[in-house]
Amino acid sequence: MHWMKPIRGRMTRNFDRPEWGPLIELAPEYVDGFMWMFEVELENGVSLHAYKHWETRRYLHLDESGRAFVYIWNENLAADDDGKYEQVDPQWLLSLVLDSERSATFVRRDVLSEHNRIRWARAANRHRVPRRSIRFVMARCRLRFTEPPPEDAPAGASPRSVFLGNDERGKALEVMAVNHGDEAMLVIHAMELRDRYRLDYEEAKRWQE
């Protein structure tokens, strides 16, 4: 699937010149489901166009010749540092981006105002995250999305809302909650952000700052 070593690239500031050609060539039937976001210049001079899917919030990075790339997240990079991109099979990446099993949405800053009450499951305290920190993340999260219940969940289990954000001390956390009665949410999980969510979180921070 991977055809070349990862290569460094830097986001340009050409936000006002969207280019739809590469996406039209790859997936003309899905163009309406994407936003053109920005351009990346690789160190070899190749330009990538980044398209984000409206529903899944995942990215396609395509060059003018139709090659596809994925961004390699590195926790040690500052926001303005050059990242690395790796070439992948375009059809494989397209199928991944279109997978709506886990769809993310942007979140307003007043998430808690949507719910009259917050309730707490016993499992919410398993990782010893203070409730004030959980509330802080839910109210100011960078990203919120819905995940289906795990495969071993009881029949009829509700989908879970996932909140990703920094607590009041600047530590990145993940919080999960489910709907619980009239405008209430039951917090079922809270812990330090895991690698499985980190790429989504870093992308959300990158475009909200």
Image (cartoon, helix red, strand yellow):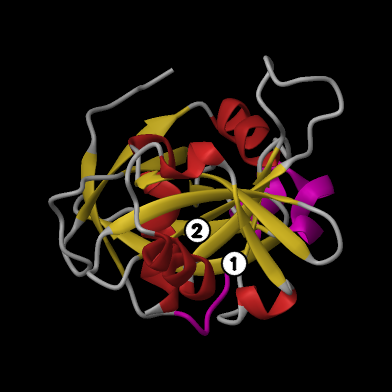
Would residue 203 be counted in the magenta stretch?
A: no
Q: Which residue is identified by label 1?
A: 36
Vertical placement of 102 versus 162: above or below? above
* Structural crowding at the residue carrying mark 1, measured as other residues with C-alpha within 10 Å and reported as few (<14), some (14–19) or many (≥20): many
Task: Kindly indicate whether the residue at mark 2 contacts the one at mark 1 (C-beta within 8 angstroms).
Answer: yes
* Structural crowding at the residue carrying mark 2, measured as other residues with C-alpha within 10 Å and reported as few (<14), some (14–19) or many (≥20): many
Vertical placement of 195 versus 183: above or below? above
The residue drawn where x is 33% and y is 73% is 12
Q: In the visual, does 139 lie left or right of 128?
A: right
The circle drawn on residue 66 is none
Whole-Å distance between the Cαs marked 1 and 2?
6 Å
The residue drawn where x is 73% and y is 43% is 27
Examine the residues drawn in magenta and state their main secondary structure.
helix
Q: Which residue is identified by label 2?
A: 50
Residue 123 placement (x, y as % from top left): 50, 36
Vertical placement of 59 versus 148: above or below? below
The residue drawn where x is 52% and y is 66% is 138
User: Could you say which is closer to the camera, residue 155 or residue 38?
Assistant: 155
User: Could you say which is closer to the camera, residue 196 or residue 36?
Assistant: 196
Q: In the visual, does 78 lie left or right of 62?
A: left
The image quadrant where one finds the C terminus is bottom left
